[in-house]
Image (cartoon, rainbow, N blue to C red):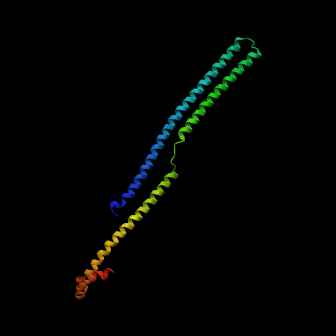
Amino acid sequence: MTTNDTTPIAKAQTAAQDLLNRTQDATRQFIETLTESTERLSTEVTSNARNAAEQADEARERVTGELRSKAEPTAEQVTGAVNELISWARRNSDRLIADLDEFRSELGVRLAPVTVVTKADLAELEARVSETEAKLAKALKATSSKSGAGTKAASSESGAGTKATSSKSGAGTKAASSGAGTKATGA
């Protein structure tokens, strides 16, 4: 085969490799973006959790200070303080849950448009490229053998006429000069 015979195969291989490279680059970029977003959101959630813990400590200290300031707190005061702590804990829990829901939602939005290429997808693509290469090689071989057969037949026809001329001195010369020898061997 000549260089022109392998050009379509080389182009198909190059296109497949380019697609694989672009897919790997896009996947790498997506993972980097996802990692950055995850780290940022994790930092925010951690910060909110720390703030909530600090606020809980402050509320606890405040309530404890209020209780200590009064020698004998009444049942209403204790109940009110406990209810306040419970209310505060619920608000902070709701806020943390909302933050986590927002994180999950944002993560879902970022993951939705992404198509991840699996090993099975790559194997299927390689199989399709190999199949296409095989069909192309077969077609090129069939084309080159058809054009080669015509050239081969023409060269064997002219050679047969020459052999007939040299082996049969009288008859071959006559056949070669009339052109009948070439036609007879070719048919």
Q: Quick check: 159 left or right of 94?
A: left
Query: Residue 114 appears at what percent x and percent y?
Result: 51, 43
> Which of the 4 quarters of the picture holds residue 174?
bottom left
Question: Residue 48 at x, y = what percent?
Answer: 58, 27
Q: Is residue 163 left or right of residue 12?
A: left
Residue 147 to residue 65: above or below: below
Viewer-closest of 49 and 3? 3
Q: Nearer the viewer, residue 107 or 38?
A: 107
Residue drawn at the location 47% of the way across and 55% of the way down: 126
Image: 114 above or below 53: below
- Residue 123 coordinates in the image, percent (x, y): 49, 54
Query: Which picture quadrant has residue 78?
Result: top right
The quarter of the rendered structure image containing the N terminus is bottom left
Figure label count = 0
Of the 4 image quadrants, the one containing the C terminus is bottom left
Residue 112: x %, y % from top left: 54, 41
Q: Which picture quadrant has residue 91?
A: top right
* Residue at 69 percent of width and 14 percent of height: 66
Residue under the image location 40 percent in, 53 percent down:
14
**Most extreme residue toward the bottom, as rendered?**
170
Residue 107 in the image: above or below residue 163: above
Tell me if 138 is positioned left or right of 48 in this view: left
- State the residue lying farthest toward the right: 75
Q: Residue at x 29, y 78 (%)?
A: 157
